[in-house]
Image (tube, helix red, strand yellow):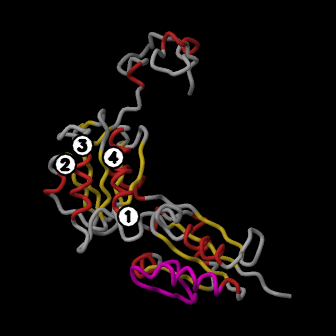
Amino acid sequence: MKILGTISIVGIGPGSMEHVTERARRAIQSSDTVIGLNTYVKLMAGLLDDQEVLQTGMTEEVSRAQKAVEMAKEGRVVAVVSSGDAGVYGMAGLIYEVLVEQGWQVGDNPSVEVIPGISAIHSCAALLGAPIMHDACTISLSDHLTPWDVIAKRVEAAAMADFVIAFYNPKSGRRTRQIEEAQRILLKYRAPDTPVGLVKSAFRERQQVTQTTLAQMLDHDIGMLTTVIVGNSTTYYHGDLMITPRGYERKYDLDAATQTLRPSERLRPEHEPWALSGEGNQ
């Protein structure tokens, strides 16, 4: 009988052990082989025992995915580690793409599980305060795989729609113009004093958190380990906190012990004149 292999595509979160989920720990510790970028494998060293470890550098994602599939088809238990969430600019999609190219179907060998982790937008938001309380999106500024004109359209659309935006991969030694172009597009739609948070190496040893504005963001150090969170038109600073209101102040008295509207009245159309249907939706 052929032994079925497994691939666990593991999101390890921001990198600190206390933010690694219990399911992720079990997947790594019970694996035969751990595959990942050098940095991420080193971050998980405390969970490794006698597993075979395969580490590669940047730009070798395809070879990691192919090796994981190859070993799992041989019956191995493989854990592929990604920082943050494996399904957000991580290895999950690529491994599925490699499998699909080989004719794999759900239920075939190997079995695959994606184990979620805390993505950078969430870990960085926690350090900044509450900047993504309202609608937010993520945009990678890396144009190695996506044409820049496509990225620019996404930045413009998000800016027009007043999304809070988290920029991943904002800048590297070879890519310096992309964050400048993103700022230029945003300034067409947002005030220069729009709050911007810069978080480098969230929850790691060299963590840096910087408060700035849209106009001044480029005056600060931004690199590949930085996540840039740009507020929307309502985002504000309160001391060291970056806060984006969700809209409770429209119908609630936030400083009153007793609310003007009773619970049964709050979803009535007359109290939500901005709603499309006027029927009130939670």
- Residue 241's place in the image compared with 221, above or below, is above
Q: CA distance from mark 1 to mark 3?
A: 28 Å
Which quarter of the picture shows residue 73? bottom right
Rendered view: 271 above or below 149: above
Check disc 2 and report the residue beneath it: 212
- State if disc 3 and disc 1 touch (CB < 8 Å): no
Relative to 144, is 94 on the left or the right? right
The tag on residue 245 is none
Of circles 1 and 2, the one toward us is: 1
**Numbered range of the magenta stretch:** 45-71
Q: Sequence order check: which comes first, mark 4 or mark 3?
A: 4
- Disc number at residue 195? 3
- Across and down, in percent, residue 246 comes to 41, 32
**Sooner in the amino-acid sequence: mark 1 or mark 3:** 1
Mark 4 highlights which residue?
A: 156
Report which quarter residue 31 is drawn in. bottom right
